[in-house]
Amino acid sequence: MKDGKIKKSFFSKEQVSAGGVAFRTDEGRIEIAIVLIVPEMRWQLPKGIVDRGETIDEAASREVREEAGIETDLLASIDKTEYWFMSDRDGERTRYHKFVHWFLMRYRSGDVENHDDEVAESRWVAIGDALKMLVFKNERAVVEKAAEMIKNLD
């Protein structure tokens, strides 16, 4: 303790996740799948931690399947984002340096109502609506890049 201030210590960990911008065309309108995550109740793109022994591509497809309830075809890499966040895990204050690999994914089958328990709701929304609903700036930037990529598909 110095000058009456208590120094809080914490651990730092690196975390790698993967996710996707899953899209479909409905009556000429491009829609993407977004998810309302619990307990935070915020709209975001489906993503999650890469499991041991799993490739980044496999993790992205699995997370979209689990969180959004749909099967997709992975088309291309969009971007890799990174950020820092703090969390209390196992009674320890931990600082995370997170890397998220984002992929463009075309809807193949499934229903957004078949999501897992980490998600309160999964839904299809127009890209413009998604840009208004998504909480994180870096995810909005990923969606903007995905929209350009979708326009250039054959």
Image (cartoon, rainbow, N blue to C red):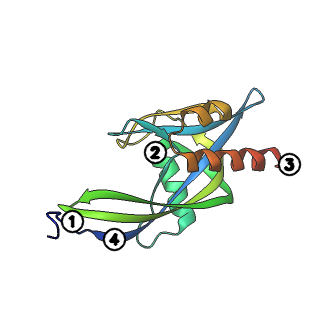
Q: Earlier in the sequence, mark 2 or mark 4?
A: 4
Q: CA distance from mark 4 to mark 3?
A: 44 Å
**C-alpha gap between disc 2 and disc 4:** 27 Å
The quarter holding residue 13 reads: bottom left
Which residue bears the numbered disc 2? 67
> In the rendered image, which residue does mark 4 sit on?
12
Q: Tell me the residue that label 1 is attached to.
A: 8
How far is mark 3 from mark 1, CA to CA?
A: 54 Å
Residue pictured at 34% horizontal, 71% vertical? 12
For residue 68, above or below residue 28: below
Task: Estimate the x, y position of residue 3 in percent, counting from the top left.
Answer: 16, 66
The amino acid pointed to by label 2 is: Glu
Picture coordinates of residue 54 (x, y %)?
47, 69
Q: Nearer the viewer, residue 71 or 78?
A: 78
Left or right position of 104 against 47: right
Q: Residue farthest to the bottom?
A: 53
Mark 2 in CB contact with mark 4 (< 8 angstroms):
no
Disc 4 marks which amino acid? Ser
